[in-house]
Amino acid sequence: MKLHRTGLQLGSVSVGAMAIMLCATPVVAATQDACGLVDGEVTCTVDGGPYDDGIRYDEAGNLVVHLEPGLSLDTVAGKTALMAISTIGSGGSLWIDGSGASINSKDGFGVFAEAQGDLVIDLASVTTQVEAPGMYTGASWRLQLGVTK
């Protein structure tokens, strides 16, 4: 699964992007800096888990999140599996590099990603399970482009 948006600008107004993939509930914060951070790059390894509370990065500027091939993020119910944000106002880009990783969430977001600059998401699979019948209407995929000044 690849999602890519680049270089959308109109005069002095920049276009921000937000992708919420397979969601069933509002965003519940994951563990900030779960895999460490070096110069705007993160590498989450198979051996570094389990990431039961999910992974969260909220950084100014460019952010690259590498998910090691074979990594399977399985969160506890109600948690966001992966939340990655290049802080709005920083003009940064976001790249989620996980073509060999899978993400599974229960009653929560699989992936929440936001950037004012370029946004690239490359994941093997994202699934959401609805385990609380009657509380949620099901899973959905949404890409929202919003204008920020």
Image: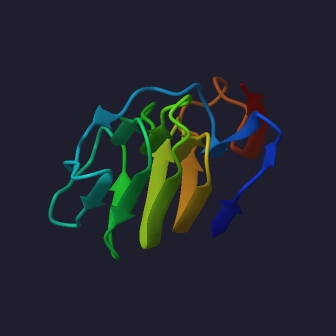
In the rendered image, residue 133, in percent from the top left (x then y), is placed at 62, 31
Viewer-closest of 2 and 88: 88
Q: In this view, does 48 lie to the left or right of 42?
A: left
Q: Which residue is drawn at 53% across and 35% down?
A: 107
Q: Which of 19 and 52 is in front in this view?
A: 19
Q: Which residue is drawn at 74% across and 39% down?
A: 15
Seen at 16% across and 58% down, the residue is: 48
Could you say which is closer to the camera, residue 117 or residue 78? 117
Q: Residue 120 location in percent, x, y?
A: 59, 60
Residue 118, given in percent of the width and then of the height, sits at: 62, 54
Circle count: 0
Answer above or below: position of 138 versus 122: above
Spot occupied by residue 97 in the image (x, y as percentages of width and height): 45, 66
Q: Is residue 21 visible?
A: yes
From the viewer's perspective, is 128 left or right of 136? left
Q: In this view, does 105 lie to the left or right of 121?
A: left
Colour scheme employed for the rendering of this structure: rainbow
The residue positioned 55% from the left and 44% from the top of the image is 113
Is 92 positioned to the left or the right of 20 in the image?
left
Indicate whether 78 appears above or below 61: above
Q: Which residue lies furthest to the left in this view?
A: 47
The N terminus: image quadrant: bottom right
Q: In which quarter of the image is the C terminus?
A: top right
Is residue 76 visible in the rendered image? The answer is: no
Front-lying residue, 64 or 75: 64
Residue most toward the right? Answer: 10
